[in-house]
């Protein structure tokens, strides 16, 4: 049996700043992973693995995603090196908080959100 470990995703997660920046760039364009896969020409699984620290991020792969999202590689490097500030992932943080709420508190939050 041939060794395919280099082409497969890793079993462990290693979150990197590169992965977080790629996620921010995708989310900033309001793209789901599936829509991003169609735009970039790579599978949604590869995007998922890249953004969640399960894939080694090669410069050519990063460039492909960044350009498809409408950014330049320099933009990516600027976000990476804190020359441009990427806002926090507000939506995902809110969803994370909502998942932890008990149903009585969740009803209160729903009422507040519906007032907007």
Image (spheres, rainbow, N blue to C red):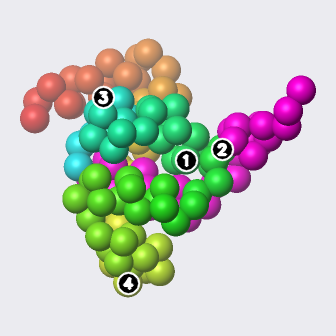
Tell me the element at label 2: loop
Frontmost residue, 85 versus 56: 56
Mark 1 to mark 3: distance in Å? Answer: 33 Å
Residue closest to the far left: 116
Q: Earlier in the sequence, mark 1 or mark 3?
A: 1
Residue furthest toward the right? 1
1 vs 4, front mark: 1
Return the residue nearer the eye: 98 or 111.
98
Residue 109's disc number: 3
* CA–CA distance in space, label 1 to label 4: 22 Å
Could you say which is closer to the camera, residue 104 or residue 92?
92
The residue that disc 4 covers is 83
Q: Are marks 1 and 2 in contact (CB under 8 Å)?
A: yes
Pinpoint residue 47: horizontal percent, then vertical percent: 48, 41
Residue at the extreme bottom of the image, as rendered? 83
Label 2 vs label 4: CA separation?
A: 26 Å
The CA span between labels 3 and 2 is 34 Å
Residue located 27% across and 41% down the image: 39
* Residue found 10% across the figure and 35% down from its top: 116
Q: Does the segment drawn in magenta span residue 20?
A: yes
Q: Which of marks 2 and 4 is nearer the N terminus?
A: 2
CA distance for labels 3 and 4: 36 Å
Q: Horizontally, is 37 left or right of 101 in the view?
A: left
Tell me: 102 left or right of 2: left
Give the quadrant of residue 82: bottom left
Residue 27 x, y percent position in the rendering: 31, 47
Q: Are marks 3 and 2 in contact (CB under 8 Å)?
A: no
Of circles 2 and 4, the one toward us is 2
Quarter of the figure that contains the N terminus = top right
Res. 41 image quadrant: top left
Residue on which the image places disc 2 = 54
């Amino acid at each position: 049996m041939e060794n395919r470990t280099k082409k497969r995703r890793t079993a462990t997660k290693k979150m990197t700043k590169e992965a977080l920046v790629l996620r921010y760039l995708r989310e900033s364009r309001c793209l789901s992973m599936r829509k991003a896969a169609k735009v970039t020409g790579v599978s949604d699984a590869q995007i998922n693995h890249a953004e969640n620290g399960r894939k080694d991020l090669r410069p050519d792969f990063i460039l492909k995603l960044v350009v498809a999202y409408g950014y330049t590689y320099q933009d990516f490097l600027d976000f990476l090196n804190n020359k441009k500030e990427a806002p926090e992932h507000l939506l995902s943080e809110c969803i994370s908080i909502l998942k932890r709420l008990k149903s009585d508190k969740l009803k209160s939050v729903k009422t507040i959100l519906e007032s907007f």
